[in-house]
């Protein structure tokens, strides 16, 4: 009838879509005794104003041994190999989910962590996030491979539309976001004899003679800092 407007919708609320893009990091070597090491990196974009209420992440030890020992998630009954696991906003440095540690009472091969501290993504905003962790100073971890995964976000308790109060069901992708394998290695440095100087004859009284050269090469897991050197020398009168 005149003056009456009828609106037909498909039942979905405006702004009800979340798009997640996996952005890394690439597979790499990471160091024992490392701090705030990124193991999963992604962006999240919302069509409308949204409240992220529940996320779940899983850390798994994926090396071929697949047995419970000191080189997996747990060192022993009182010490975890991976601690300070948290979700952070890369651009602001804000911690979005408080840090958690591997439980020494849990599985040595795979453990999950729930993030239930709310944070917000506003319409058409892109938030760049990372999961980071600390690694124990444990030489048994050398060669251990780990993978961090974000479990498919729940459509009943994961992300809420701030306008309607409804939970968002249109989440792309609707599957797990699986990080790349990261391999733990102890930091190393290799010292070799440099190509210069070569054997030579010098005149008595000459100063600042280049007697020997060394090359220091850091391993792939981390930078190293050389703080001291001990050098022995041998002189032959002949």
Image (cartoon, rainbow, N blue to C red):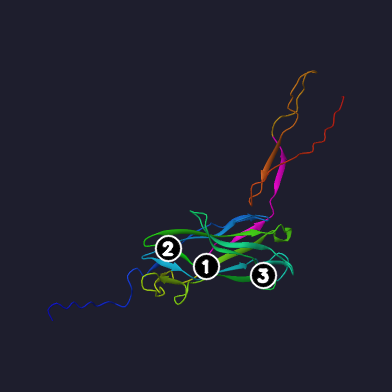
Q: Tell me if residue 67 is in the magenta stretch.
A: no
Q: Is residue 195 left or right of residue 27?
A: right
Q: Secondary structure at mark 1?
A: loop
Chain-order first, disc 1 or disc 3: 3
Residue furthest bottom in the image: 1
Q: Nearer the viewer, mark 1 or mark 3?
A: 1
Q: Secondary structure at mark 2?
A: strand
Q: Is residue 151 left or right of residue 124?
A: right
Q: Position of residue 113 (x, y in %)?
A: 58, 70
Residues drawn in magenta: 178-194
Residue at 20% over, 78% down: 6
- State the quadrant of the N terminus: bottom left
Contact, mark 3 vs mark 2 (Cβ under 8 Å): no
Q: Position of residue 20 (x, y in %)?
A: 44, 64
Crowding near the residue tagged with mark 2, few <14, some 14–19, many ≥20 C-alpha atoms within 10 Å: many
Residue 117, numbered label? 1
Chain-order first, disc 3 or disc 2: 3
- Please tell me which residue lies in front, 210 or 226: 226
Residue at 39% over, 59% down: 125
Provide the residue designation for mark 2.
121
Q: Identify whether 191 is placed above or below 115.
A: above
Q: Tell me if residue 182 is in the magenta stretch.
A: yes
Crowding near the residue tagged with mark 3, few <14, some 14–19, many ≥20 C-alpha atoms within 10 Å: some
- Location of residue 207 (image quadrant): top right
Total tally of numbered discs in the picture: 3
- Please tell me which residue lies in front, 8 or 221: 8
Provide the residue designation for mark 3.
103
- State the quadrant of the C terminus: top right
- Location of residue 114 (image quadrant): bottom right
Q: CA distance from mark 3 to mark 2?
A: 31 Å
Q: CA distance from mark 1 to mark 3?
A: 20 Å
Q: Position of residue 136 (x, y in %)?
A: 69, 59
């Amino acid at each position: 009838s005149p003056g009456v407007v009828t609106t037909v919708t498909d039942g979905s609320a405006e702004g009800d879509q979340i798009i997640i893009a996996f952005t890394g990091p690439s597979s790499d070597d990471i160091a024992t005794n490392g701090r705030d090491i990124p193991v999963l990196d992604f962006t999240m974009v919302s069509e409308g104003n949204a409240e992220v209420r529940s996320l779940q992440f899983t850390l798994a030890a994926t090396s071929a041994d697949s047995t419970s020992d000191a080189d997996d998630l747990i060192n022993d009954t009182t010490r975890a190999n991976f601690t300070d696991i948290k979700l952070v906003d890369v651009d602001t440095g804000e911690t979005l989910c408080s840090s958690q540690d591997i439980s020494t009472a849990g599985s040595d091969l795979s453990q999950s962590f729930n993030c239930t501290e709310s944070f917000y993504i506003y319409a058409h905003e892109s938030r760049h996030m990372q999961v980071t962790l600390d690694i124990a100073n444990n030489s048994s971890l050398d060669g251990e491979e780990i993978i961090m995964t974000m479990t498919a976000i729940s459509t009943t308790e994961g992300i809420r539309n701030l306008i309607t109060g409804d939970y968002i069901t249109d989440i792309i992708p609707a599957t797990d976001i699986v990080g790349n394998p990261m391999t733990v290695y102890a930091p190393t440095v290799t010292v070799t004899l440099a190509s210069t100087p070569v054997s030579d004859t010098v005149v008595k009284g000459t100063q600042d003679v280049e007697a020997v050269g060394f090359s220091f090469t850091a391993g792939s897991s981390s930078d190293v800092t050389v703080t001291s050197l001990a050098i022995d020398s041998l002189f032959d009168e002949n």
